[in-house]
Image (cartoon, helix red, strand yellow):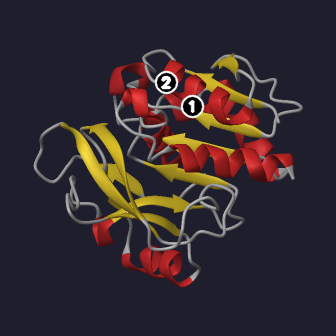
Amino acid sequence: MRAAIIVFPGINRERDMAIALAQSFGRAPRMVWHRDSDLDGLDLVVIPGGFSYGDYLRCGAMAAQSPVMQAVRAHAARGGYVLGVCNGFQILTEAGMLPGALLRNAGLRFVSRDCHLRVERADTAFTAHYQRGAVFRAPTAHGDGNYFADAATLDRLEGEGLVALRYAPPTGNPNGSVRDIAGILSPNLRVLGLMPHPEDLVDPLLGGADGRPLFDSLAATLAA
């Protein structure tokens, strides 16, 4: 099982993500600078959170044009797994790998607090260690996490079962995302983008392990 984390200027969650991956995979992931394009031999590519390029233009817009993203697209096209968290989700939408867009939070304020997520399907490589309908806790830290897509796209996502996670009680929707969507999948179920940070809750010493099953799910899938 070989994983890599893409590092852009301004990204700041790569070390948190590396800890989460190492715990579940049993080995440290490779760090790949955004100007590199060698992703050969990898099973999983992760785009972590932060503020790539200072969030200039639109969040993720500049990173989406970086040389490494062509390699990420090729990795996904040949069946590799891709996980984008927070800014990583924004980059995946800007790169056209996932539909929709992440807009300013409905309250026009940066949100930094825990939220609760409901698992909409548990038969994917990212969610297999959760139960469908289970609710788990994850931190949020974003100013542009308001997921939006047109009605036709939303209906397609719903109809094809591509909504992976939704914001749920007791905390509810922190940013105004349409239909409470917190995370979506690609049609082949190998690309997941989500706004909250499961990598920040993978150990009781860090305040809980609610996010650990996501990484254990990937580890089990890739080891099979």
Q: What element carries label 1?
A: helix
- Viewer-proximal residue, 54 or 129? 129
**Where in the figure is residue 201, as x and y percent of width and height?**
42, 37
Q: Say whether residue 190 is visible.
A: yes
What residue is shown with label 2?
Answer: 16
**Where in the figure is residue 14, as x and y percent of width and height?**
52, 22
Q: Which residue is drawn at 43% across and 24% down?
A: 52
Q: Say whether residue 96 is visible.
A: no
How many badges with numbers are in the image?
2
Left or right position of 179 against 120: left
**Where in the figure is residue 22, as x and y percent of width and height?**
66, 27
What residue is shown with label 1?
Answer: 20
Between the residue at mark 1 and the residue at mark 2, the CA separation in whole angstroms equals 6 Å
Q: Which amino acid does label 1 sit on?
A: Ala
Left or right position of 39 against 117: right
Crowd around label 1: few <14 · some 14–19 · many ≥20 (10 Å): many
Above or below 189: residue 213? above
Left or right position of 42 against 188: right
Q: Which residue is drawn at 41% across and 27% down?
A: 205
- The image quarter containing residue 64 is top right
- The image quarter containing residue 182 is bottom left
Above or below 167: residue 83? above
**Where in the figure is residue 33, as x and y percent of width and height?**
65, 15
Quarter containing the N terminus: top right
Q: Which amino acid does label 2 sit on?
A: Asp
Q: What element carries label 2?
A: helix
Residue at the limit of the structure toward the front, as seen here: 204
Query: Do the numbered discs 1 and 2 sit on residues whose CB atoms are within 8 Å?
Result: yes
